[in-house]
Image: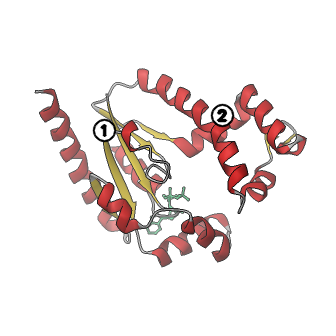
């Protein structure tokens, strides 16, 4: 099974693009969403996060998102420790999910592929890029976030130019109306790539 990584900076439109691939019949796995679900359902993750952050990490058995966000904001040690707890479990979950997919390829959306040097886990990588101002505006209105918070996250992510250089495909998402054409073209190229590599 060919695994296509879909990445891009905060607010670039990864999930929007992933949904378009899904509309073409391609199974999509959104790592962030699955991670959040696992943080509530896995007793091992829960135990380890409570050990890391204290009892306040969960409220009424649900992940205390504002508390955790506050802890990891500007604290790389906490962020890395949390990732070390959650990422391997998401990896296992993805492997089980992958086994039951029946499709020429799947899309796995992950915000940080290059930053964590995870390129080797993917057969092909698509980066979604967009103007910084547009990304900022989109995230602020989607999450009721502040410019400072979004800019701080952007600062920790690789630039669009560097990401584009390392990717097999690049989708420019400044304007929604151009997306489906770009997605359809890439879909065809991926199918061709799979055909060529199986001959
Ligand atoms: P994150 O990194 O925060 O998970 P993302 O890269 O997955 O974000 P999306 O959630 O797809 O990005 O998009 C961010 C917000 O911007 C969403 O509310 C989405 O509806 C909106 N959006 C995405 N693309 C466009 C566009 N071309 N024009 C206007 N709004 C858009």
Among numbered discs 1 and 2, the one appearing first in the sequence = 2
Image location of residue 78, percent across then percent down: 73, 50
Where 159 falls versus 196 (above or below)? below
Which residue: 53% across, 42% down?
A: 31
| Disc 1, SS | loop
Q: Position of residue 195 (x, y in %)?
A: 15, 33
Instruction: Using a 10 Å C-alpha cutoff, classify the residue at mark 1 as few (fewer than 14 neighbours), some (14 to 19) or many (20 or more).
Output: some
Q: Secondary structure at mark 2?
A: helix
Nearest to the eye among marks 1 and 2: give it. Answer: 1
Q: Quadrant of residue 58?
A: top right
Q: Position of residue 34 (x, y in %)?
A: 58, 38
Report x, y in % for residue 168.
27, 51
Q: Is residue 176 visible?
A: no
Q: How is the image coloured?
A: secondary structure
Residue located 55% across and 28% down the image? 93
Query: Which residue bears the numbered disc 2?
Result: 38
The relative height of residue 149 versus residue 50 in the rendered view (above or below) is: below
Mark 1 and ligand 1: say if the CB distance to the nearest ligand atom is below 8 Å. no
Instruction: Decide if residue 77 is on the left or right side of residue 125.
Output: right
Alpha carbon separation for disc pair 1 and 2: 25 Å
Residue under numbered circle 1: 123
């Amino acid at each position: 099974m060919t695994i296509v990584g879909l990445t891009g900076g905060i607010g670039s439109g990864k999930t929007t693009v992933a949904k378009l691939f899904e509309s073409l019949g391609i199974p999509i796995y959104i790592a962030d969403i699955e991670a959040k679900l696992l943080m509530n359902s896995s007793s091992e993750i829960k135990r380890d996060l409570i050990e890391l952050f204290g009892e306040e990490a969960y409220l009424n058995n649900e992940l205390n998102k504002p508390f955790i966000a506050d802890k990891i904001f500007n604290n790389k040690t906490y962020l890395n420790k949390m990732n070390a707890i959650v990422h391997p479990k998401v990896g296992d979950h993805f492997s089980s999910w992958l086994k039951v997919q029946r499709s020429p390829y799947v899309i796995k959306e992950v915000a940080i592929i290059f930053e964590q040097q995870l390129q080797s886990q993917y057969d092909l990588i698509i980066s979604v890029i967009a103007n910084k101002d547009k990304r900022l505006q989109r995230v602020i209105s989607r999450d009721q976030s502040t410019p400072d918070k979004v800019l701080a996250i952007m600062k920790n992510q690789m630039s669009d130019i560097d990401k584009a250089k390392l990717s097999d495909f690049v989708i420019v998402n400044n304007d929604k109306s151009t997306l489906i054409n770009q997605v359809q073209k890439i879909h065809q190229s991926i199918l061709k790539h799979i055909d060529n590599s199986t001959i």
